Amino acid sequence: MKKTGFPRFFAAVLLILLGSSCKSGAECRRETIFAFDTYMTFTVYGDKADEAISAAKERISALEKLWSPTDPESEIFRINHRTESTVTLSAETSGLLRTMLDVSEMTGGALDPTLFPLEKEWGFISGEYRVPGKERIAALLENTGYENITLDGDRLTLPDGFELDVGAAAKGKAADIIADCFSGIGVKSAVIDLGGNILTVGEKPDGGKWSIGIRSPYGDGTSGTVKCVGRSVVTSGNYERFFVEDGKRYHHILDPKTGFPAENGIISMTVIGAESVICDSLSTALFVMGTDKACAFLAGNDDTDAVFVTSDGIIYITAGIKDTFTYTGDGNAEIRIIEGK
Ligand code: AMP
Ligand code: MG
């Protein structure tokens, strides 16, 4: 039985920031740290750059302490090892979970923060990958389902056996928190890149738009670039974390209906919008939903733009970014525009 695991840092630099080097002239500081199992880069312009980067590093380490699923001192670990069915959450965790549950609701459960028992069984938490039997998956699915948990303000109630995984949206929420922190400090121009989960703050120092590269699902290059100001660009892909067993590839984004990796026609889903936590939640959910449902969802949501690639090589983009998206892939991919309502 041949099994190949791919390290998580493959997910790093998922999106590539283009044309944003700290050039002499503009006051700029850039720093990369390793947190949340990935590389994070802060690029900050202006005289508040040093203060902003120190604050960002502090915030990230505090948030990692809350949301790590494996750190016995984290809030998520404490929730998953609770002795009472109701627990009181920190403001950051209740905010994150509120958004995730709202997105679960509006995507028909494609996003589900209760899949931790399955992620563990597949080995995506420990790195000891295995394909579970169908009966084991069916048994574990009994202890999942976002509709079975209740969040009332900061009070979370979970049935016995339920465990949370906020990995699908934690980096997005962290990016929003860092952006708020930058605004509070008075930063006017910055890019927050949390393992490819990008949030741009304001305009470029020269007043222009940021150009963000979307990593190609086929390799190191990009499939396109989008220009944006003050928006977030987040990608979920089947190439980020996966293993191969008996010639078949199994990736980390699970379909909550089956408990198996989602295979609904999409190999890479990039969502572009104002709030990074929404983009992060939706990139995972729309990936799971597959081409037809994702197109229908995006056609009905004017605030959300997206670029996605299907297993047959077609690139779909929403009408809202058709003037700012530039195709940079090899060959001549078919590009289809998703028109709004
Ligand atoms: P992302 O890379 O943002 O798409 O998030 C993927 C991570 O979210 C996985 O590594 C799991 O921890 C978790 N996850 C996988 N499938 C789902 C799902 N359908 N709903 C919510 N979280 C998921
Ligand atoms: Mg996500």
Image: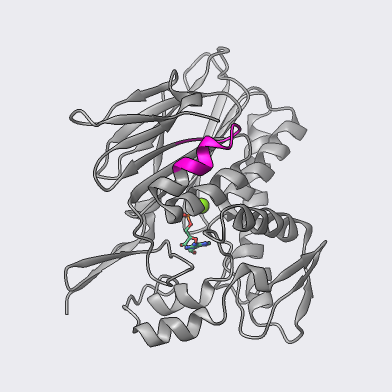
Q: Is residue 304 magenta?
A: yes
Q: Image quarter for residue 91?
A: bottom right
Residue that appears at 37% across and 65% down: 261
Which region is colored magenta?
Answer: 295-306
Q: Is residue 116 visible?
A: yes
Which of 103 and 6 lies nearest the eye of the viewer? 103
Compared to residue 60, the image places residue 156 above or below, namely below
The x, y position of residue 105, in whole percent, is 63, 57
**Residue furthest front in the image:** 341
Which of 65 and 240 lies nearest the eye of the viewer? 240
- 148 vs 246, left or right, is right
Compared to residue 33, the image places residue 126 above or below, namely below
The x, y position of residue 304, in whole percent, is 56, 35
Q: Image quarter for residue 7?
A: bottom left
Q: Quadrant of the C terminus?
A: top right
Q: Quadrant of the N terminus?
A: bottom left
Q: Is residue 62 visible?
A: no
